[in-house]
Amino acid sequence: MRDFRDAKLMAKTLRQALASRDVALTHSEALELVARQFGFDQRNILSARLEEAEAVPPAIAIQPPIPIFRIFDVDKAKEFYCGFLGFSLDWEHRFGDHFPLYCQVSRSGMLLHLSEHSGDASPGARAFVPVTGVRAFQAELAAKQYRYMKPGVSEAPWGLEMEVIDPFNNRVTFCERP
């Protein structure tokens, strides 16, 4: 159970099930029964415990991974990811003048790190990205007339795919699942 709305939904379901057997309960009585099912004397205690549980963050919370792609030319990388794919450059980091670039680009919630540092990633990496609207995305890219990449959409058993390959041989497969 996530929050007290779930308890209310359970109470409603319980009332409906009992009503079909000619047992009438008020919503309040049904909420009290739900609270007892969870080991609490009253629904107010159940509600308070659920609020406490919401306030405490989970001990382990795993976030989506952020792929790191190795790049060799900052201008080419920005042209491809920002100009062609339509990502935004969120931030850049260098340890000093004439040091390798490490940056983040993003689009629609997808984060990607690009790095000139030799130890961060291997060229030729691949990321699989679930999307909606892959055909519209492909049409958007085709309209840009990017000289080095003309991606199409192909049908795979798991959905419609569009693969792009950056100037450093890193691959991003955008897939719209059925």
Image (cartoon, rainbow, N blue to C red):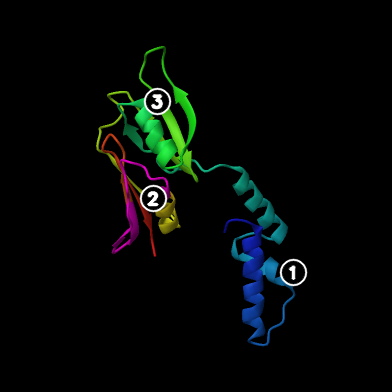
Tag nearer the camera, 2 or 3: 2
On the rendered structure, is 162 left or right of 143? Answer: left
How much space separates mark 3 and mark 1, taking CA atoms?
Answer: 58 Å
Q: Could you say where residue 70 lies in the image, as x and y percent from the top left?
A: 30, 31
**Quadrant in the picture for the N terminus:** bottom right
Q: Is residue 115 left or right of residue 9?
A: left
The numbered mark, 1 or 2, whose residue comes first in the sequence reads 1
Q: Which residue is mark 3?
A: 102
Of circles 3 and 1, the one toward us is 3
Residue drawn where x is 42% and y is 49% of the image: 143
Using the image, determine if residue 101 lies above or below residue 12.
above
Q: Dot 2, crowdedness within 10 Å: few (<14), some or many (≥20)?
A: some
Residue placed under numbered mark 1 in the picture: 28
Q: Type of residue at label 2?
A: Ala
Give neighbour class at mark 3: few <14, some 14-19, many 20+ (Cα, 10 Å): many
Report the front residue among 37 and 88.
Answer: 88
Q: Position of residue 47 (x, y in %)?
A: 68, 55
Asked if the stretch drawn in magenta spans residue 51, the answer is no
Helix, strand or loop at disc 1?
helix
Report the amino acid beneath label 1: Ser
Q: Which residue is mark 2?
A: 142
> SS for tag 2?
helix
Residue, x 32% and y 23% (percent of image)? 117
Question: Distance of mark 1 from mark 2, alpha carbons?
Answer: 59 Å
| Secondary structure found at label 3 | strand
In the rendered image, residue 75, in percent from the top left (x then y), is placed at 38, 27
The residue type indicated by label 3 comes to Tyr
120 vs 142, nearest the viewer: 142
Q: Which residues are magenta?
A: 141-162
Residue in the foreground of this view, choosing between 80 and 129: 80
Relative to 97, is 54 above or below? below
Residue 146 colored in magenta in the image: yes
